[in-house]
Image: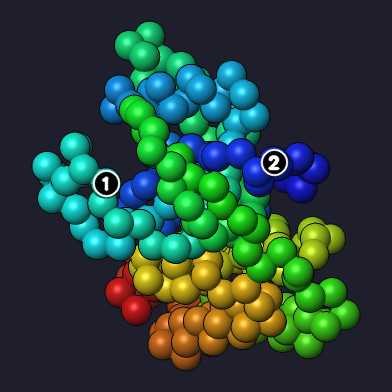
Amino acid sequence: MFETITINFQKPIPLFPLETCILLPHSVAPLHIFEDRYRRLAEDILDSDGLVVMALFERKPSEEEYLHGQPTLRPFGCLGYVEHYDRLPDGRYMVLLQGVCRVRLEEELISEPYRTARVSPHGLADAEDQVLLHQRAYLSEILANKKLPQLEHVQNVYHIMERQIPTAALVDLLSTFVFEDTESIYGLLEEENPAVRAELLIDRIQFLVDILPLQNLNSDDEDDPADDQPWDGRDA
């Protein structure tokens, strides 16, 4: 997951713009590539360095604008690396994209059939783990709360916490499990300070803990019908 990837920021990088923000550094996202222009994009990046920038539309484009125009993009994106792919018989691609780093879109270039831009790294000067020691300790404490096993994907969260990985990377990974709306995820994407990102994550987990009902905590409750319907926090 943390292999070294060499990136040439002097050359244009293909853009894959979406309406929703789906990728943070260190996380993975599945992509189903079926449009002709993005099949070409997939072919080109697989023949080169496997890098693509997941970008985000400033607003939802009309169908005409999406197909034939250049809808405005937000200034920040996530550089992704193709970790795995399958090319289907009809030419579509199923791609697993690994988030590499935050980037700022500096200059979009005239290109066909897909968009490209020069980008620069954003927020790479991550704080040392010693600086984030307090946040990591608090994350470990709050994730031990007995309410959290009711949350969907929580076992993935516990598994991640057991790894010896940098705290800034840990925050990005955990954020993919507790943030779901585009604006929140984009806010984490454009925030370059890892300590601020850690605090945003802690606040979100604390919010979920505060609103989760206290249940399933002892064997006396095993016949409670609510036991069979774990709440996943999606309506928070």
- Quadrant in the picture for the N terminus: top right
Which residue is depicted at the point 55% across and 39% down? 12
In the displayed structure, 77 sits above or below 150; it is above
Q: Residues within 10 Å of mark 2 (few under 14, many from 20)?
A: few
Which residue is depicted at the point 29% across and 27% down? 35
Mark nearer the N terminus (1 vs 2) = 2
In the displayed structure, 107 sits above or below 8; it is below
Which residue is depicted at the point 30% across and 56% down? 72
How far apart marks 1 and 2 lie (CA) works out to: 25 Å
Disc number at residue 116? none
Location of residue 192 in the rendering, given as x and y in whole percent from the top left corner: 62, 73
What's the amino acid at mark 1?
Gln
- Quadrant in the picture for the C terminus: bottom left
Location of residue 3 in the rendering, given as x and y in whole percent from the top left corner: 79, 42
Color style of the picture = rainbow
Which residue is depicted at the point 78% across and 81% down? 132
Mark 1 element type: loop
In this view, the residue farthest toward the bottom is 210
Choose between 28 and 20: the one closer to the eye: 20
Tell me if I can see residue 208 in this picture.
yes
Disc number at residue 8? 2
Q: Is residue 49 left or right of residue 219?
A: right
Q: Which residue is mark 1?
A: 70
Contact? badges 1 and 2 (CB < 8 Å) = no
What's the amino acid at mark 2?
Asn
Choose between 165 and 103: the one closer to the eye: 103
Q: Is residue 224 left or right of residue 176?
A: left
Location of residue 53 in the rendering, given as x and y in whole percent from the top left corner: 51, 46
In the displayed structure, 48 sits above or below 63; it is above
Location of residue 148 in the rendering, given as x and y in whole percent from the top left corner: 54, 75
In the displayed structure, 56 sits above or below 126; it is above
In this view, the residue farthest toward the top is 89
